[in-house]
Amino acid sequence: MLDLVIRGGEVVTPQGVGKWDVAVQGERIVSVGLPDERVEAGRIIDATGKVVVPGGIEPHTHLAHFVSMHPEENLHTLGPEEDTRGMVFGGTTTHVDFCFVRPGLDIAAAIESRAARWKGNSYADYSFHVALQGQLPIKLFDQMPDAIAAGFPSFKVFTVDVLPPHPKRHPYRLDFGRIKLAMEQVAKHGGIMAVHAEDHDLVQFMYEKFREEKQTDGWLLPDVHSKLSELLAFHRTIQLAAHTGAGVYFVHTSAREGVEAVAAARARGLPIYAETLHHYACFNAEDYRTPRGFCYHTYPSLKFPDDQAALWDGIVRDGISTMATDEFPTTLELKLRGQDLENVTGGNLGAEARVGITWSEGVVKRGMSLPRFAEVTSTNAARILGLYPKKGVLAPGSDADIVLIDPAIAKTLRREDFHVSDYSPWEGWTVRGWPVTTILRGKVMVENGRLLGATSDGKLVARKISPEVLRRPSC
Ligand SMILES: [Zn+2]
């Protein structure tokens, strides 16, 4: 007898969309096929009227992370035990966070300490990008193949120091020599680069200039973290990737210039992928001037309506592969504490809303197809980061990570709709359709507004990227 059958819903698979039964045994899906009333199961979930999609994959979170915008205070973002509760309420079953490797640390030790922090403390499954920062010893890059073999094949680098220098702030930037070395390693050993690409010189020059002019207003952020900066850094990174043969995943693409640079590279057959954030797609620089405007901020910065149009075009049609959050959960007070150019708190609180907002804004408002919705919220992140086909697809053999969306829901989001902090940037936003049931490896985590899972349910997932993803743009 089967453990669980989800019946009567509109099921979204790579082969198409249909009214199929999704059958689950233990932690896996065993079949997706025509309904059969004779089948017996421990539990049958009636999904009539719902849309059944693969569990969301959030490719970009910073949980239990040092808040470098206020370096004197030794503050951290909320941890996995708090943030992943929101994820499962919002239809996300897996997330990828970061382990930061700075001079003096080994890659394996950095992974081990992050994995220990997460163990038993996450409602959702998880993995980590390895983030390489600062003047790392050249020898350290020899450790990259071991990390890839151990199931951590994505390496985050910054081409920029995102904030002005401060004695208590770690430098973020990796110089282009070291980025080239990292690219050579991933190209050879089956890894991928995750790049925060901005032009270091332009960004730091603008901080200096505004400081000298005594202009400090936070809403000048788009002049510091500018469209031109994204243009230059995306092109420079792509040239280096083409030269070394590395695949690149551009995190938080924010401007039309970034979208176009990625499109041009993909047209040449290069394995280049873009992520954007629902915050970048839904808000723009004008929003900084509203009372809670810095709620919507993350670095680089919000851009302009024309950029939002390019991002939506890339998400709905092609060219942007993933919708992410750049999750950085704090209290409202901490999020709004910095109001000037040099200390606005970056990062978003939106992992819980990501799947629902993409549904409402993408599928309902912009006519995004259901398979495309599954791709940008789940399947593509799984492919690019090496979770596929264990994650990211409703297919026999895959983990039974399943989400039911109720398209009939129409509501204005309120604070009570969220489960992480004392605020959500999405309060007051009107939506149609929202996730209602979340299943992680066969276990119902959230149903009818009730949390049924525990922080002991989330597990570390080993990743391995398909060679096809690294050979050409394949999603
Ligand atoms: Zn980030």
Image (cartoon, helix red, strand yellow):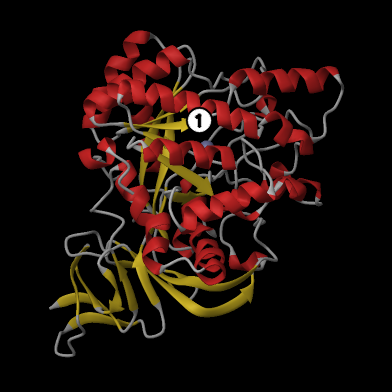
Q: Dot 1: what SS? A: helix
How busy is the neighbourhood of tag 1: few (under 14 within 10 Å), some, or many (20 plus)? Answer: many
Q: Residue at x 56, y 26 (%)?
A: 232
Amino acid type assigned to the residue bearing label 1 in the image: Phe
Q: Quadrant of residue 143?
A: top left
Q: Which residue is mark 1?
A: 234
The N terminus lies in quadrant: bottom left
Q: Residue furthest right?
A: 214
| Residue 268: percent from left, percent from top | 36, 36
Q: Is residue 123 visible?
A: no
Q: Residue furthest bottom?
A: 37
| Residue 196: percent from left, percent from top | 51, 31
Q: Is residue 473 visible?
A: yes
| Residue 453: percent from left, percent from top | 39, 63
**Please, is residue 401 above or below residue 217 in the view?**
below
Q: Quadrant of residue 425?
A: bottom right
Relative horizontal placement of residue 146, taking residue 320 as reference (left or right): left
- The total of numbered circles placed on residues is 1
Q: Residue at x 36, y 61 (%)?
A: 55
Relative horizontal placement of residue 280, taking residue 30 as reference (left or right): right
Q: Residue at x 32, y 37 (%)?
A: 269
In front here: 332 or 92? 92
**Please, is residue 79 above or below residue 57 in the view?**
above
In front here: 387 or 79? 387
In front here: 72 or 236? 236
Q: Is mark 1 within 8 Å of ligand 1?
A: no
| Residue 118: percent from left, percent from top | 39, 42
**Please, is residue 45 above or below residue 401 in the view?**
below
Q: Residue at x 28, y 61 (%)?
A: 441
